[in-house]
Image (cartoon, rainbow, N blue to C red):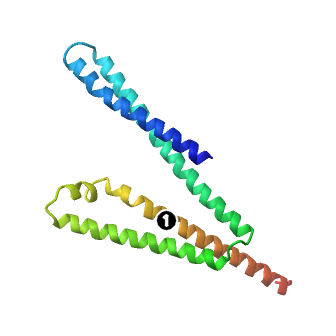
Amino acid sequence: MALRLLADRTRQQRAAVDAAERSLTPAKNRYEGGITSYLEFVTAQSVALTNKRVAVDLVTRRMVAGVSLVRGIYGGLLAKRAISRATVLVFGFTLVIIAGGDIYLLQSLAALAKITASLADDTVFLSERSLALYLLPAMYGGIGINVVSHILLRHLAEAEREFLEEHPDA
């Protein structure tokens, strides 16, 4: 429910960003033509920037809500014993392996981008934008490590409890 509401709000905010972006050119033209003051142009820029900030905030909240949903489902299934720990452990390692493969692929593509003559791939792989490409694999890897460490910590806690039961004088 919250994800759907955030998705709807994000779509509305994207429309507001687009409208604000479209209003920038006429405001700039009116200012440069001497029809209006610089204040109108700066106000249009301010509105566009505010809309972009709200859009980024909504996207961030959607990502956090999505991760929280996954963690909630995982926790619920594990608590109900609907899936085994071994399955969850394999899932966690799989996420880490997928993340590593994605990062290797991105590195390979970046190396190819350096040797090609095209400028289009340079703007994606050899600029600050390339950081965005690494966010999803980093998230997969982080979730995978979190899942694996959760399973290992629970296993260690149970082993410690069993040891203390067998050796009460320790």
Q: Position of residue 141 (x, y in %)?
A: 49, 67
Is residue 107 shown left or right of residue 51?
A: left
> In which image quadrant can residue 72 be found?
bottom right
Q: Is residue 23 visible?
A: yes
Q: Position of residue 39 (x, y in %)?
A: 32, 17
The outermost residue toward the right is 168
Q: Residue at x 22, y 68 (%)?
A: 112
Q: Position of residue 166 (x, y in %)?
A: 83, 87
Which residue is denoted by mark 1 in the rendering?
A: 140
Is residue 90 shown left or right of residue 157?
A: left
Q: Residue at x 42, y 32 (%)?
A: 16
Q: Residue at x 13, y 61 (%)?
A: 117
Q: Residues within 10 Å of mark 1 (few under 14, many from 20)?
A: many
**Helix, strand or loop at mark 1:** helix
Q: Residue at x 63, y 47 (%)?
A: 1
Q: Is residue 167 visible?
A: no
